[in-house]
Image (tube, helix red, strand yellow):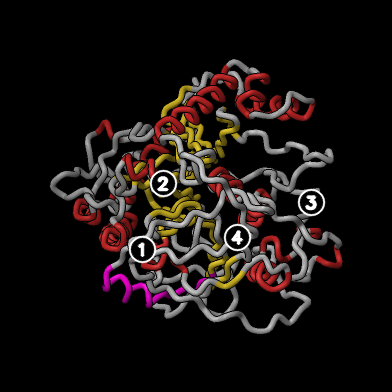
């Protein structure tokens, strides 16, 4: 169940306002009587979720460039004394974090939090909600800049265990909030002084080979500003489709692809899926090859999947040394879209986190990753979160070597970035270059209109339960395989009276290829967020909604959202 933003009006409180809660007895009234939720053994899940959402919204608001103040906010939060004190500290820390983010790249102008409740348990006077926070943090870009390729939002999806306790008056009081932050960098809406340690299973292990030492760490110093525009890798090379890698990450960053298992530390599993979708071919597959870094493959069980598929350290050695699909970048600011950044949080020379670049704007890469599921977090913010390390490490896939991009940075930011805590490795996923004839580029507005009409046609086909409509908008042949896949899409989403709330078109992949982000709601109020690759062929725009199209030999292409069998 997704709770609508501010469905229950609990006024967001500032750190200063929350201070008043610390001295209120647990059972005391803190707001109007109407603010109290009905208490019963079967707790009002919607009401409790509304309180949890308002609390999480309050946290996110403190990160913005105009956080709420004590004079502008009235505290209607009902919390136990200890939880109120903890919230006070967290809000103050989040406000400082927001100020730091504003200094490094402009911060966030607005925040919106939605809550999805996964499970509710009531045991006497205690109610426990397992829920997922979905937060969208608007970035300080104009509509024109977004049209040019700037990301509109940073987004995150974070599981929480939230508990409520009944006070002496029977009202439910927020008593604890535990976010699942294990395995990755500290989520944006959380506060922590330490970097996450890789204590959870990532599917990797000690390889058969002694790999020797890694290449030198890459520099994190921003490159000098030459006024050059960002270099864009070709959307499709002789071997790989970088667009499909990015589109896959955009689509599955927060709702994991059910065709794959999810690991405790899922970041590199996610990266491997994106590489496979973009054309990386599996190597090996025999059980005896599982523990060797020379092979890379996915199987129906963990025990039939190579270490290199989901283990960050193992993936590094396969891609860089054995498959030679990467080379080392000298500076992390050279990262381009579809490149991969890896991190060693504990500085023990063992890589434990992987991220993919899904946006590059004015010299700044924006990163997307699983485990602390996050979409389009700027490299600037990531580096400012880890200010104590000295170096980063950066491998890049062989093939096209884009020239150095030059972000606009001042001297203070240069000094700050030299103090990184995490040892990072940037792996650019690129192989082979393709040449293109020079053609006049159509206007962005005309391209956006055509791509938007394709998205609208897709929604119309879902609402009318039309397999023919899906096949047409997908630009595929009307054959048995496409009919079967269309039937699966209609069984999942068809006939639900979707209403489009927003469509965002991004043409930074070129005039004939881009990405479309769809926001819609069905008749029951359930939200739909989806991202597609959009392509224009012979003047007609299509959506890449069919992912299992056979190749010319009758076999499925490796560029698919489904693992190879």
Residue bearing the label numbered 4 = 429
Up/down of 529 relative to 375, above or below: above
Judged left or right of residue 446, residue 415 is left
Q: Earlier in the sequence, mark 2 or mark 3?
A: 2
Up/down of 175 relative to 489, above or below: below
Q: Earlier in the sequence, mark 4 or mark 1?
A: 1
Separation of disc 1 and disc 3 at Cα? Answer: 43 Å
Separation of disc 2 and disc 3 at Cα? Answer: 38 Å
At 52% from the left and 76% from the top, the residue drawn is 346
Q: Is residue 194 visible?
A: yes
Circle 4 SS class: loop
Q: Residues within 10 Å of mark 4 (few under 14, many from 20)?
A: many
Circle 1 SS class: loop
Residue toward you, 25 or 254: 254
Residue bearing the label numbered 1 = 407
Circle 2 or circle 3, nearest the eye: 2
At 64% from the left and 23% from the top, the residue drawn is 472
Q: Which residues are magenta?
A: 410-425
Circle 1 or circle 3, nearest the eye: 1
Which residue reaches farthest bottom? Answer: 212
Judged left or right of residue 339, residue 167 is left
Q: Are marks 1 and 3 in contact (CB under 8 Å)?
A: no
Where residue 397 sits: x, y (%)?
Answer: 61, 65
Residue bearing the label numbered 3 = 300
Q: Earlier in the sequence, mark 3 or mark 4?
A: 3
Q: Is residue 354 visible?
A: no
Q: Within the magenta stretch, is there residue 418?
A: yes
Residue bearing the label numbered 2 = 149
Separation of disc 4 and disc 1 at Cα? Answer: 21 Å
At 37% from the left and 62% from the top, the residue drawn is 381
């Amino acid at each position: 169940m997704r709770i609508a933003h501010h469905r229950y009006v609990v006024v967001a409180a500032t750190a200063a306002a929350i201070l008043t809660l610390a001295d209120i007895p647990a059972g005391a009234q803190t707001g109007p009587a109407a603010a109290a939720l009905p208490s019963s053994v079967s707790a009002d899940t919607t009401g409790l979720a509304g309180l949890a959402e308002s609390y999480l919204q309050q946290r996110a608001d403190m990160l913005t460039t105009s956080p709420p103040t004590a004079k502008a906010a009235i505290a209607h939060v009902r919390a136990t004394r200890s939880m109120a004190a903890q919230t006070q500290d967290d809000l103050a820390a989040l406000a400082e974090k927001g100020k730091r983010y504003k200094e490094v790249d402009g911060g966030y102008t607005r925040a919106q939090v939605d809550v999805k409740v996964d499970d509710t348990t009531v045991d006497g006077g205690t109610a426990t909600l397992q829920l997922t926070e979905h937060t969208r943090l608007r970035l300080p870009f104009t509509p024109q800049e977004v049209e040019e390729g700037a990301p509109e939002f940073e987004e995150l999806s974070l599981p929480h265990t939230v508990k409520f306790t009944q006070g002496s008056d029977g009202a439910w009081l927020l008593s604890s909030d535990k976010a699942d932050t294990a395995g990755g960098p500290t989520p944006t809406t959380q506060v922590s002084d330490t970097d996450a340690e890789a204590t959870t299973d990532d599917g990797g292990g000690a390889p058969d080979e002694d790999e020797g030492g890694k290449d030198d760490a890459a520099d994190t110093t921003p490159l000098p500003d030459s006024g050059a525009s960002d270099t864009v890798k070709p959307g499709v090379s002789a071997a790989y489709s970088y667009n499909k890698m990015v589109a896959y990450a955009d689509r599955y960053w927060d709702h994991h692809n059910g065709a794959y298992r999810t690991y405790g530390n899922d970041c590199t599993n996610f990266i491997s899926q994106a590489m496979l979708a973009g054309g990386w071919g599996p190597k090996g597959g025999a059980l005896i090859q599982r523990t060797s870094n020379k092979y890379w493959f996915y199987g129906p069980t963990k025990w039939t999947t190579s270490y290199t598929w989901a283990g960050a350290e193992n993936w590094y050695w396969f891609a860089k040394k054995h498959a030679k699909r990467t080379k080392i970048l000298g500076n992390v600011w050279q990262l381009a879209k579809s490149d991969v950044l890896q991190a060693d949080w504990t500085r023990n020379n063992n890589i434990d986190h992987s991220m993919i670049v899904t946006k590059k704007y004015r010299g700044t890469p924006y990163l997307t990753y699983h485990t602390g599921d996050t979409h389009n977090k700027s490299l600037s913010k990531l580096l400012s979160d880890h200010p104590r390390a000295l170096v980063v490490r950066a491998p890049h896939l062989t093939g096209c070597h884009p020239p150095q991009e030059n972000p606009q940075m001042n001297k203070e930011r240069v000094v700050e970035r030299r103090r990184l805590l995490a040892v990072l490795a940037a792996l650019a996923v690129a192989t082979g270059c393709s040449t293109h004839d020079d053609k006049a580029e159509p206007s962005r507005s005309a391209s956006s209109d055509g791509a938007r009409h394709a998205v609208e046609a897709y929604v119309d086909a879902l609402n009318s339960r039309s397999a023919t409509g899906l096949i047409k908008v997908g630009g595929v042949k009307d054959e048995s395989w496409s009919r079967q896949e269309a039937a699966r899409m209609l069984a999942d989403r068809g006939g639900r009276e979707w209403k489009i709330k927003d469509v965002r078109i991004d043409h930074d992949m070129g005039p004939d290829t881009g990405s479309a982000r769809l926001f819609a709601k069905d008749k029951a109020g359930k939200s739909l967020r989806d991202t597609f690759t959009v392509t224009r062929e012979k003047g007609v725009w299509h959506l890449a909604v069919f992912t299992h199209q056979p190749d010319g030999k009758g076999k499925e292409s490796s560029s698919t959202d489904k693992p190879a069998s």
